[in-house]
Amino acid sequence: MHIPDGYLSPQTAVPFIALMVPVWGVAVKKVQEKLKKKDVPVLSIAAAFSFTIMMFNLPIPGGSSAHAVGAVLLAILLGPWAACLGVSVALIIQALVFGDGGILAIGANCFNMGLVMPMVGYYVYKLVKGSSDERSGRALIAAAIAGYVGLNVAALFTALEFGSQYHLFQAADGTPLYFMYPIKVAVAAMMSEHLLLAGPVEALVTALGLRFVGSTYPHLLLESASFDKFGKNSGVINHV
Amino acid sequence: MFKNFSKLWLALGVFIILSPLGLIATGTAFGEWGVDELQEEAGFIPAGLERLADLWTHAPLADYGIAGFDASFIQSAAGYILSAVVGVVLVAGIMSFFSKIVKD
């Protein structure tokens, strides 16, 4: 899902960077307001986990590959804004140090995996979990569904972004200037891979990750259980 | 930083060691083909794409490996694990700066 440089026109890639700069500003402010010093190691580990889980490429029949992202697990544990920063930092390091995903495309990649995915996943989790305990079976099912939906919505955005280039930017002779397949092809390929393979893996990663944290450090989840649906928080860990 | 959540760090370490499993998938993800792969994938290289593709060529561990050290699976796996360690240290290190700006 890491769009390389050249797949998006500068006219598409630059506005995504312009959009993400204030988003990161808001995210830093939210994290500053709500996260406490003792929560920062969890944020560090979770962001590093997201980096690592993206290295687990899953083989897709036909010679392609895809991977989970971990963004929804971060959002459930630390809130969507903290997840936005953690995943964005992982994506920026991946682009600069490992050449995975473009530099000009960094705004779009952070938008898809660092903003859309944790936001969608977080609210799907809250909706499905309802008032159940954070360590209940229902919470695990909610986490799985949230991971699945979050990754797939991110994949859809990615496909629409590069797929639209084919129709918007063509040379005088009609050949595409950037991404080379029509939007229908992009959406069909991206969605079949993520709906059938990467999505179920993301669901598993999100639910098992939540279960692991719940069994090793239950206070991290018990504190967040006091977070009610209206966003008021009397607990120790604040979701941001 | 390490003492309060040692089990989470340990789990992260296990993922780092297992990361070469990600090398089993040899295919390039949809929409992530390199310029060298595009000719075969699409039959041509779009002009604008070719112009922008090499915007950043300074990645020290490009493709999560050590340049020239990929003759065998063992070499690739070593480069992959090193990449995971470097990535984890950088990402966790950058995020730890938040302890300077958040409340106690």
Image (cartoon, rainbow, N blue to C red):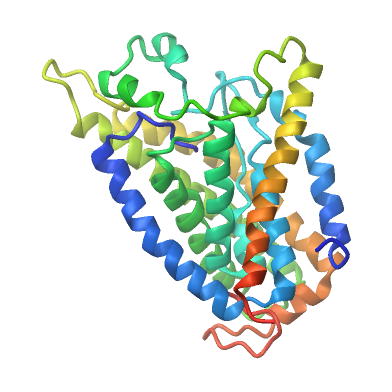
- Against A163, residue B8 (above or below) is below
Q: Is residue A180 visible?
A: no
Q: Nearer the viewer, residue B58 or A216?
A: B58
Q: In the image, what residue occupies the spot 38% across and 39% down?
A: A104
- Against A220, residue B56 (above or below) is above
Q: Quadrant of residue A42?
A: bottom right
Q: Percent x, y for residue B2? A: 84, 61
Q: In the image, what residue occupies the spot 36% across and 50% down?
A: A17
Q: Quadrant of residue B71?
A: top right
Say whether residue A213 is left or right of residue A185.
Answer: right
Say whether residue A130 is left or right of residue B52.
Answer: right
Q: Is residue B104 visible?
A: yes
- Against B28, residue A105 (above or below) is below
Q: Quadrant of residue B102?
A: bottom right
Q: Percent x, y for residue A86? A: 59, 57
Q: In the image, what residue occupies the spot 45% across and 62% down?
A: A24
State which quarter of the image contains the C terminus of chain A.
Answer: bottom right
Q: In the image, what residue occupies the spot 59% across and 32% down?
A: A98
Say whether residue A108 is left or right of residue A194.
Answer: left
- Against A77, residue A148 (above or below) is above
Q: Percent x, y for residue A123? A: 52, 68
